């Protein structure tokens, strides 16, 4: 049942209105927990949903950092299924890019 719910969320997370509702429902901590403890399929879908939620959304991206998602994403990028590796690597890349941009902006300011 969890696999099916995550699959539906991954489709919905690509639509702005649904994205807002998903975040308001406090799902980010649950998705991060699934990165750590879920089945391989759960981890795939959780990483796909988190990627959709964090693309072009610095607030959600910062939330991932605060909630400790970097370590489970790094582990998933090394040891997950091929799809999970791609999603986790993309999300880590976005996170790294945002952090380097923040450092440049802080130096200029």
Image: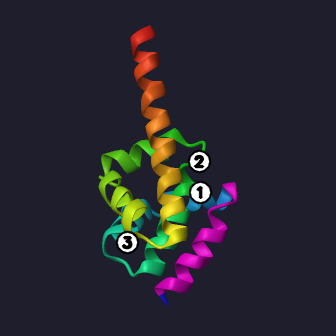
In the image, residue 48 sits, relative to residue 5, either above or below, namely: above
Of the residues under marks 3 and 1, which one precedes in the sequence? 3
Residue 10 makes an appearance in the image = yes
| Marks 3/1: CA–CA distance | 16 Å
Residue 79 rendering spot, x and y as whole percentages: 38, 68
Instruction: Residue under label 2, please give it.
Output: 55
For this view, does 63 lie left or right of residue 24? Answer: left
Instruction: State the SS at label 3.
Output: helix
| Marks 1/2: CA–CA distance | 6 Å
In the image, residue 105 sits, relative to residue 68, either above or below, namely: above
Which is nearer the eye, 2 or 44?
44
Seen as rendered, the residue at the extreme bottom is: 1
Instruction: Residue under label 1, please give it.
Output: 52
Residue range of the region highlighted in magenta in the rendering: 2-16
Q: Quadrant of the C terminus?
A: top left
Which is nearer the eye, 58 or 97?
97
**Residue under the image location 44 percent in, 72 percent down:** 43
Instruction: State the SS at label 1.
Output: helix
Disc 1 and disc 2 in contact, CB within 8 angstroms: yes
Residue 108 rendering spot, x and y as whole percentages: 45, 9
Q: Is residue 11 magenta?
A: yes
**Residue under the image location 35 percent in, 46 percent down:** 65
Which is nearer the eye, 7 or 41?
41
Residue 61 rendering spot, x and y as whole percentages: 46, 45
Of the residues under marks 3 and 2, which one precedes in the sequence? 3
For this view, does 27 lie left or right of residue 49? Answer: left
By secondary structure, the bulk of the magenta-drawn segment is best described as helix
Q: Which image quadrant for residue 16?
A: bottom right
Instruction: Residue under label 3, please give it.
Output: 34
**Residue under the image location 46 percent in, 17 percent down:** 105
């Amino acid at each position: 049942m969890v696999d099916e719910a995550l699959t539906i969320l991954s489709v919905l997370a690509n639509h702005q209105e649904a994205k807002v509702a998903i975040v308001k429902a406090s799902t980010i901590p649950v998705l991060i927990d699934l990165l750590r403890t879920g089945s391989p399929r759960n981890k795939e879908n959780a990483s796909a949903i988190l990627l959709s939620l964090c693309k072009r959304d610095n607030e959600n991206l910062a939330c991932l950092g605060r909630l400790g998602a970097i370590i489970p994403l790094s582990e998933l990028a090394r040891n997950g299924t091929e799809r999970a590796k791609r999603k986790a690597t993309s999300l880590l890349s976005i996170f790294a890019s945002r952090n380097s941009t923040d450092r440049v902006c802080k130096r200029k300011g």
